Image: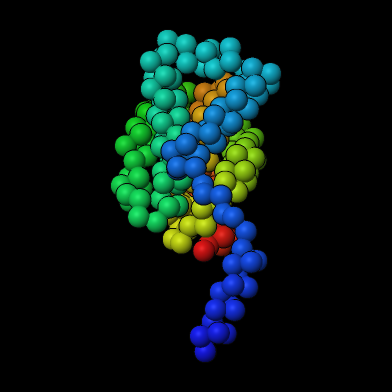
Amino acid sequence: MSRPLTDELIAALADDASPVKPLAPPLQRGLAALGVLATVAVLSIFSLGDVSGLGTRYLGREALMLAEMGAMLATGVLAVLGAFFVSIPGRSRLWLLAPLPSFAVWVGLSGFGCYRDFVAAGAGGWAAGHSLDCFTFLLGTGALVGIPLFWLLSRARPVDSLPVATLGGLGVAAISAFLLQFFHPFALTAIDLAVHAMAIAVVVAIASLSRRRTLTPA
């Protein structure tokens, strides 16, 4: 291509170019997203949740409740923040490991609490309980939280979308499980716990498999 034609092409592209507004830092965008989610969650809990039922469920085990729910919330927050960070090329991949310790604590405490209830309930510990309601709640809440969250993540046009989607899915699942505690004030049976784990796995899997639609690659 001759020099005049090259100059004309550059000039034409420059004339049509529109200013690009840079994204805010990932920490700022992640905290803003979490702030909006927290506001909606608080309003939903106090208008529709059963806070007293949650207290009754953990009566005498308040420390377990605080530790378990704290681990859920920490997993959700760290996973969401991690998704915003790894969506930017060159950011530390250690964010992929950030939610794992709190996730392990969450799983361990949930299993321990379920085991105690199972021992107390005997054969009733194998009852289906409210498994279907919990499964529906986790998937529905996961969609409500995940759609706006993934739209925000997609604005970074992540090149490697799988870790972004996996972290985002884990964050959505953990936040949904945290909210479930305020709407499911019943002791968990072994079947309930298995269904919870299945629903969380489904949310993460859907987020990962749908990444090409939800996270537009560059």
| Direction from residue 143 to residue 187 in the image, left or right | left
Question: Which residue occupies the foreground of this view, 90 or 114?
Answer: 90
Q: Residue furthest bottom?
A: 2
Q: At 59% across and 78% down in the image, what residue appears?
A: 9
Residue 3's spot in the image, x, y percent? Answer: 51, 85
Question: Which residue occupies the foreground of this view, 10 or 36?
Answer: 10
Q: Residue furthest right?
A: 47
Residue 160's spot in the image, x, y percent? Answer: 44, 61
Examine the image and state in which quarter residue 62 appears.
top left
Q: At 57% across and 46% down in the image, what residue appears?
A: 152
Q: At 46% across and 62% down in the image, what residue appears?
A: 159
Examine the image and state in which quarter residue 39 appears.
top right
| Direction from residue 69 to residue 211 in the image, left or right | right
Q: Is residue 160 above or below residue 174?
A: below
Question: Which residue occupies the foreground of this view, 160 or 91?
Answer: 91
The reply to whether residue 118 is in sight is no
The reply to whether residue 18 is in sight is yes
Q: Which residue lies furthest to the front in this view?
A: 4
Residue 67's spot in the image, x, y percent? Answer: 38, 22
| Direction from residue 90 to residue 153 in the image, left or right | right
Indicate the colouring scheme. rainbow
Tally of numbered tags: 0
